[in-house]
Image (cartoon, coloured by chain):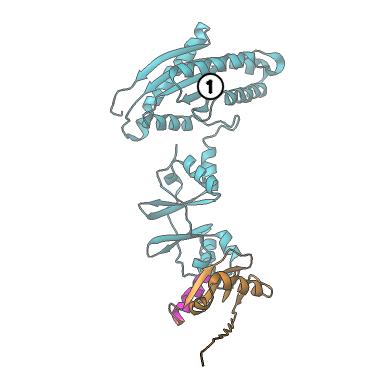
């Protein structure tokens, strides 16, 4: 979830909200960005991709359509392809 | 010299971080205030200002609109210190705290209004109150100080002969000369009264006398408007005190004593037609306040 700088709810409110629904499952990353104030991201996602890799992509794509008054919910689909060689 | 405490209003309004920005705006509007300290379980966690209220959606939590880094000041701090702190941090408000308890807020406008009472409007110099405060502060630190008391010669005559507007211009030009000669790091200049100026300095008595002679020479060599001659007489007195008792209003008596000696020395200089008269350094003993 991306929180716009002038959105009706801010990161602290989002943190309390997600903590009430799913305690300890989300992390809030505060940003120094022209449009967004913070990103609330599921911790399990960060186990697949470090936030240094994940956030620039999410922010770049969201910035194309959002403004600073929005709270944007972004769905990330990560596809993992595994290829293994086995002895027959 | 007033302290921060003198500007604190009696009633203090605070807000909880989980209140809405709209609620903060309503409180500010209702009580005509420009900021609210944000307090959670008795602890100061931020400050929300009218600017934040305008910037953020009213549905937001105060916690999402407040400034988390709060600059605080003690109620006993001098107003000049509060003003410097605000300029340094580019802020317009300071939260006043004492032993981690919030006791009020002071604004830059309040401070400037109050400090304006201690600034001479004609010359822009400090008035005597600031001078006394500075001298006392130096003595409290155990520093040796010297007072240079300066008195324009025949200023009444200049006013009578050329008019008071001309006299005012002479005072302004005198201020420029003095400001150019002093060193802000060791000298504090004030317009003491009418045509009298005073400098409190951490220079030695010998160095203070040297400065006084430079001032007298600069006045004599100055190109004054109307080609008139303006001279100044100086008296210098030095003193040292390693410890001063905290005795409230009367604790400035040592400085007053020094100023008095320097003032009498300048009168003597005028009478004897000597440019500078120096009073030997005085060692003040521990004395109970009157």
The residue that appears at 46% across and 67% down in the rendered structure is B17
For the N terminus of chain B, the quadrant is: top left
Callout 1: chain: B
**Residue B48, image x and y in percent?**
51, 61
Residue B200 appears anywhere in the view: yes
Q: Nearer the viewer, residue B203 or B288?
A: B203
- Color of chain B here? cyan
Q: Is residue B196 magenta?
A: no
Q: Is residue A11 magenta?
A: yes
State the residue position of label 1.
B196
Is B90 placed left or right of B39 in the picture? right
Reply above or below: B111 against B184. below
For the C terminus of chain B, the quadrant is: top left
Outermost residue toward the front in this view? A88
Residue B152 appears anywhere in the view: no
Reply above or below: B105 against B163. below
Q: Nearer the viewer, residue B39 or B264?
A: B39
Q: Nearer the viewer, residue B40 or A11?
A: A11
Q: Residues within 10 Å of mark 1 (few under 14, many from 20)?
A: some
Stretch in magenta: A8-20
- Color of chain A here? orange
**Residue A53, image x and y in percent?**
57, 71
Label 1 sits on a secondary structure element that is strand
The residue that appears at 68% across and 17% down in the rendered structure is B223
């Amino acid at each position: 979830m991306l929180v716009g700088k002038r959105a009706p709810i801010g990161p602290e409110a989002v943190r309390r909200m997600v903590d009430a629904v799913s305690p300890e499952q989300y992390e809030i990353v505060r940003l120094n960005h022209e449009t967004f104030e913070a990103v609330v991201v599921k911790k399990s996602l960060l186990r697949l991709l470090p936030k240094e890799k994940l956030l620039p992509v999410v922010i770049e794509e969201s910035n194309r359509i959002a403004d600073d008054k929005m709270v944007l919910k972004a769905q990330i689909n990560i596809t993992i392809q595994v290829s293994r060689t086995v002895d027959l | 010299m007033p302290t921060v405490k003198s500007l604190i209003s009696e009633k203090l309004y605070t807000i909880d971080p989980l209140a809405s920005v709209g609620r903060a705006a309503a409180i500010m509007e209702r009580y005509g205030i420009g900021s609210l300290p944000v307090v959670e379980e008795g602890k100061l966690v931020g400050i929300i200002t009218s600017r934040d209220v305008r910037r953020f959606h009213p549905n937001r939590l105060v916690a999402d609109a407040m400034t988390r880094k709060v600059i605080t000041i003690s109620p006993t701090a001098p107003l000049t210190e509060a003003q410097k702190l605000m300029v340094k941090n580019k802020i317009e408000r300071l939260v006043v705290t004492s032993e981690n308890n919030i006791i009020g807020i002071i604004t830059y406008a309040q401070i400037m209004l109050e400090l304006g009472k201690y600034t001479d409007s004609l010359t822009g110099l400090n008035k005597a109150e600031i001078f006394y405060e500075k001298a006392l502060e130096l003595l409290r630190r155990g520093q040796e100080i010297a007072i240079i008391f300066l008195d324009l010669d025949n200023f009444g005559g200049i006013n009578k002969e050329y008019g008071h507007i001309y006299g005012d211009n002479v005072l302004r030009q005198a201020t420029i000369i003095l400001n150019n000669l002093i060193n802000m790091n060791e000298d504090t200049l004030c317009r003491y009264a009418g045509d009298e100026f005073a400098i409190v300095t951490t220079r030695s008595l010998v160095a203070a006398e040297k400065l006084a002679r430079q001032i007298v020479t600069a006045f004599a060599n100055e190109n004054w408007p109307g080609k008139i001659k303006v001279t100044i007489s100086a008296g210098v007195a030095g003193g040292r005190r390693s410890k001063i008792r905290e005795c409230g209003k009367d604790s400035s008596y040592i400085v007053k004593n020094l100023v008095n000696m320097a003032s009498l020395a300048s009168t003597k200089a005028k009478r004897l037609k000597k440019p500078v008269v120096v009073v030997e350094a005085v060692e003040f003993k521990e004395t109970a306040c009157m």
